[in-house]
């Protein structure tokens, strides 16, 4: 795939992937807030074989070099031959375009692989490079006769950059817990209605009956723990996706290189591990990512993935918990609906008009659904 020039700014593709970019330069653009766009995380996806040959994800990071030889901007781009592992569903678009005689795949995806986590998709050490970076992605699509490019889970502050470039904006919702400066879980519960407060206390007591819960991070994480969690992850992955997205070695690498960002919560019964939840720790948020179990225990999923995460966010004074895609059951556990955005560049004008019409209708339904859900949060009503 070809490089491009935008207004005398050269935007280039690094064929060696994120691994071929100097880590300090990539992270100078990505910042420290969101671990999912860090050089460590993205290079682990490549080196572990989770991304690369045979996966349908080809790493094609877009780069802009500054005049001083330092990286001025970057975007985590991927050539995709399917729509798996994205969590913003465009299968209907692919079917429609292919029925019309077009080839929807390959396409370009600007994302953190397998991570429905809002964050920057334009990594800008020099903010003035945003239009050139977006333009370079558009030229990558045009020069290679591709159907489209898609930036998914774009943080709110960057939506306007894509919109100004004429990309179509898609809206959806996730459920997040907001830490309003709580000193304890009980202080959080005070804000809930009496019935919801009692129900959560009952759920928590029932979930952990006869169990021990351990939190592991940093040097406490060993290969033994990753072997345990791999078993859980494989079970969940096989049921949800058919084939787990991450390889076994990916977890070892995450522990070795990002251990201080990993939080593994394990439940044991009589010394035997039976369930676990893996989180990543950002500068102001806890990100829930993977869960699995080998025993079906009522409410244990809620305890490990949602309530324990709230405990951690309060203890670490993090602003929120982002518990991943979908899951209306999170609402009753204190997780409220929040908007998420994606941006889409459709090369063909007719196809673009059709998608734009679909998004207008979909957005109205998404907003109405979110308003409906907001009225049904467990918090006391004024």
Image: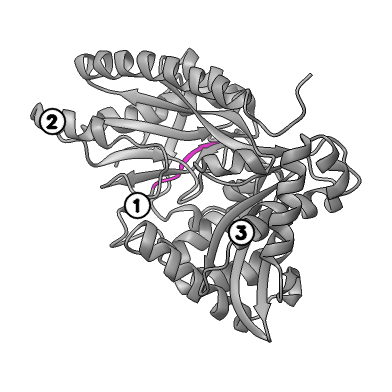
Question: Cα distance, mark 2 to mark 3?
Answer: 47 Å
Of tags 2 and 3, which is closer to the observer? Answer: 3
Of tags 1 and 2, which is closer to the observer? Answer: 2
Whether 146 is among the magenta residues is: no
Q: Residue at x 39, y 31 (%)?
A: 137
Q: Residue at x 69, y 34 (%)?
A: 378
Q: Earlier in the sequence, mark 1 or mark 2?
A: 1
Residue 325 percent location from the top left of the image? 51, 43
The one of 11 and 310 positioned closer to us in this rendering:
310
Residue furthest toward the right?
183
Question: Cα distance, mark 1 to mark 2?
Answer: 21 Å
Q: Residue at x 57, y 19 (%)?
A: 371
Checking the image for residue 363, the label placed there is: none
Crowding at label 3, few (<14), some or many (≥20) Cα neighbours within 10 Å? some
Q: Earlier in the sequence, mark 2 or mark 3?
A: 2
Q: Is residue 298 visible?
A: yes
29 lies left or right of 169? right
Give the magenta range. 60-65
């Amino acid at each position: 795939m070809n490089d491009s020039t935008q207004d005398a700014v050269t935007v280039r593709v690094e064929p060696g992937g994120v691994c071929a970019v100097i880590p300090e330069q990539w992270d100078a653009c990505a910042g420290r807030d969101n671990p999912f766009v860090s050089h460590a995380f993205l290079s682990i996806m490549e080196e572990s074989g989770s991304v690369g040959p045979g996966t349908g994800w080809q790493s094609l990071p877009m780069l802009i070099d500054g005049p001083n030889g330092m990286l001025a901007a970057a975007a985590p781009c991927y050539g995709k031959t399917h729509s798996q592992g994205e969590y913003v569903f465009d299968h209907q678009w692919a079917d429609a375009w292919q029925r019309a005689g077009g080839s929807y795949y390959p396409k370009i995806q600007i994302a953190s692989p397998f991570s429905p986590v809002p964050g920057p998709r334009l990594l800008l050490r020099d903010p003035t490079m945003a239009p050139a970076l977006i333009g370079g992605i558009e030229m990558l699509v045009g020069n290679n006769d591709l159907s489209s490019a898609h930036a998914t889970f774009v943080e709110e502050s960057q939506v306007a950059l894509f919109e100004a470039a004429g990309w179509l904006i898609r809206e959806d919702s996730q459920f997040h817990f907001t830490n309003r400066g709580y000193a304890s879980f009980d202080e959080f519960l005070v804000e809930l209605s009496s019935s919801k407060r009692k129900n959560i206390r009952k759920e928590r007591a029932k979930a952990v009956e006869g169990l021990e819960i351990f939190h592991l991070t940093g040097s406490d994480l060993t290969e033994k723990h990753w072997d345990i969690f791999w078993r859980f992850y494989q079970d969940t992955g096989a049921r949800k996706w058919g084939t787990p997205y991450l390889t076994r070695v990916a977890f070892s690498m995450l522990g070795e290189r990002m251990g201080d960002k990993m939080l593994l919560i394990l439940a044991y019964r009589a010394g035997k591990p039976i369930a676990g939840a893996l989180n990543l720790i950002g500068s102001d948020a806890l990100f829930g990512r993977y869960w699995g179990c080998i025993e079906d225990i009522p409410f244990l999923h809620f305890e490990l993935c949602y309530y324990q995460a709230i405990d951690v966010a309060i203890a670490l004074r993090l602003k929120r918990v982002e518990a991943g895609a979908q899951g209306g059951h999170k609402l009753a556990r204190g997780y409220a609906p929040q908007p998420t955005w994606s941006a889409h560049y459709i090369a063909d004008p007719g196809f673009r008009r059709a998608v734009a019409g679909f998004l207008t209708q979909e957005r109205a339904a998404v907003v109405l659904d979110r308003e409906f859900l907001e009225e049904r949060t467990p918090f006391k009503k004024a």
